[in-house]
Image: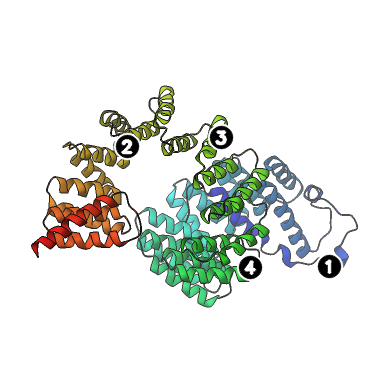
Amino acid sequence: MLHKNHTLKAVYIILIFSFCSTANSYTYPSSEKQNTILTNSQLIDNPSYFDFSPQAESIYKKSIYQAIFRLIKNNKIDEAESRVSNLLKNSTPEAEIFNLKALIAISKKDIKLAITNYKKAIELNPEDLLAHTALANVFFDSKKITEASNYANKALTINKKSTIPYKILSKIAENQDKLQEAKNILLTGQKNVRGEATLEIEIATSLGDLYISEKQPQKVLTIAQDIANRYPSNNATLDFLVRAQLANKQTKQAEQTLRQLIKQDTSDSKHRLVLISLLINSKKNEEEILPLLNEVSLIDPNNIQTLITTAALLTKLKHYPEALKTADEIKRLSPNTGIADQIKGKIYIDEKKYNQALSLYRKIYRTQPTKKTLFKIIDILMIQNKHQEAISLLDKELNKDNNNVAAHYKLATIYQQQQNLDKSENHYKKVIDALPNNTLALNNLAWLYYEHNLPEAISLAKKAYELDPKSANIIDTYGSILIKQKKFNQGIEILQKGVKLAPKNYNIQYHLAQAYSKSNQNKLALEILNRILKNEHNFTEKKLAQLLFNKLSSNQTLIH
């Protein structure tokens, strides 16, 4: 899917395909080999150094363009600009040179100059696919839809297998709410690139994004399975299939595909990490997980992102010593980012070593005073029942900036835990004044009023529900308040929706049982209570659920 401000990346992709298509397919004749080895710089500065045959000269020029492209990609813009200027002085202008000048302009965020250079490239070569595609891309980002469409369509007349124009045209249609047209464009592209796995997957990925946005993941899976059947050993195909399987919650099938992927590629750390995550979430045997983690550490020993993921997975497995060692390795490779300390803090919290975690987060906060770290400190203090210290820290933040909404919200939740109505209400109102549609504050304040039997509870709960009708917690609050106001039918309907959305949230099920009980539907209430109390999982209101179950069971016995 195309996104705003993706111009430079997209043009890089276009250039890579353009410059790399034939460069590696030519072998120089022995008569053209030279005894003197020149550097890239010397080659670029001396385009007439060799007397090449036409074929060799073409390959030679392409190597020069590739060298300049690498300079741009590595952000050596001044050097690249100098090389291009030398080319223009010492050789006949060609479209490729102006494409490079355009890319330099994009790197310098001079879009107007980039457009001028791409148009110059088209003047020199009216069939220049790269310039037409790049201009379509630039105009799309600039929201000049007519120009973007024209250049994208022209690019497709030059080469109907060019994938980026299809994606641009599809995105234009999608932005105009023409979803069927957007899909048809991509389906046409898919038909035209059929037989080339990489291009098929590129189009299919964009098509998949559309189907996901329409909540039709099954259609993505159908496409992925078709491609996988035709290219059963292609890694990119299998990667697409895994993503489609996960979108359809086909965990077992995804595990099987991932195993095939990593078997085919011994250096693939990314898919090993995905497989490990799935195995941990499904509580599979560690006999498979630990060797996979070991393989990952051998494949990418110095990859920071891989190490971060590895540390997180080890923590989830409760292999804390190994997780801490991984954090130390991250610290060695990236000593000044603070990432390693954040990971160690998370490990200490997971181990319930709160003093060590608190000490570490205080150290982090002294050098990097972010809200995230401050709230980690606050959370630990709350766990340790050091409420007043947590409140003092937040008060200091508000003394610095009384408009700190996050600090107001945090204080409101602390005072709510302490059943301090006035102070909790005051801070929630500060949040709502700044953010009138903040559903968390609206919902929490509604619950606070509910607990204190205040009539304002219903209006706040209703507003939160209207803003976010798919939040289980908001549904729970709204439904419970409706029941308290004896609006049983409406309240039960709302709570039933909450149970469907969050079947493992047993507090909501308890509140539904309460609702049935208050509306004299004791049989339904007992069925729910019996089910949730038999479950081994604890939930906040389990004791209250047991009391209600005992009461209703006793009443049933008396009736019989």
Cβ–Cβ below 8 Å for labels 3 and 4?
no
Q: Using the numbered discs, state the Cα–Cα distance from disc 2 to disc 3 in whole angstroms.
A: 27 Å
Label 3 sits on a secondary structure element that is helix
User: Picture coordinates of residue 379 (x, y %)?
Assistant: 43, 38
Cβ–Cβ below 8 Å for labels 2 and 3?
no
Q: Using the numbered discs, state the Cα–Cα distance from disc 1 to disc 3 in whole angstroms.
A: 62 Å
Q: Residue at x 44, y 47 (%)?
A: 143
For label 3, the residue is 364
Q: Using the numbered discs, state the Cα–Cα distance from disc 4 to disc 2 in whole angstroms.
A: 52 Å
Cβ–Cβ below 8 Å for labels 4 and 2?
no
Earlier along the polypeptide chain: callout 1 or callout 3?
Answer: 1
> In the depicted view, which residue is nearer to us: 372 or 13?
372
For label 1, the residue is 29
Per the rendering, the mark at residue 417 is: 2
Front of the two marks 1 and 2: 2
Q: Which amino acid type corresponds to the residue marked 4 in the rendered image?
A: Asp
Cβ–Cβ below 8 Å for labels 4 and 1?
no
Q: Which amino acid type corresponds to the residue marked 2 in the rendered image?
A: Gln
User: Picture coordinates of residue 222 (x, y %)?
Assistant: 43, 72
Earlier along the polypeptide chain: callout 4 or callout 2?
Answer: 4
Q: Residue at x 62, y 55 (%)?
A: 15
> In this view of the protein, can residue 274 be seen by the observer?
yes
Label 2 sits on a secondary structure element that is helix
Cβ–Cβ below 8 Å for labels 1 and 3?
no
For label 4, the residue is 265
Q: Residues within 10 Å of mark 4 (few under 14, many from 20)?
A: few
Q: Using the numbered discs, state the Cα–Cα distance from disc 1 to disc 2 in whole angstroms.
A: 82 Å
User: Picture coordinates of residue 270 (x, y %)?
Assistant: 58, 60
Front of the two marks 3 and 4: 3
> In the depicted view, which residue is nearer to us: 204 or 423?
423
Label 4 sits on a secondary structure element that is loop
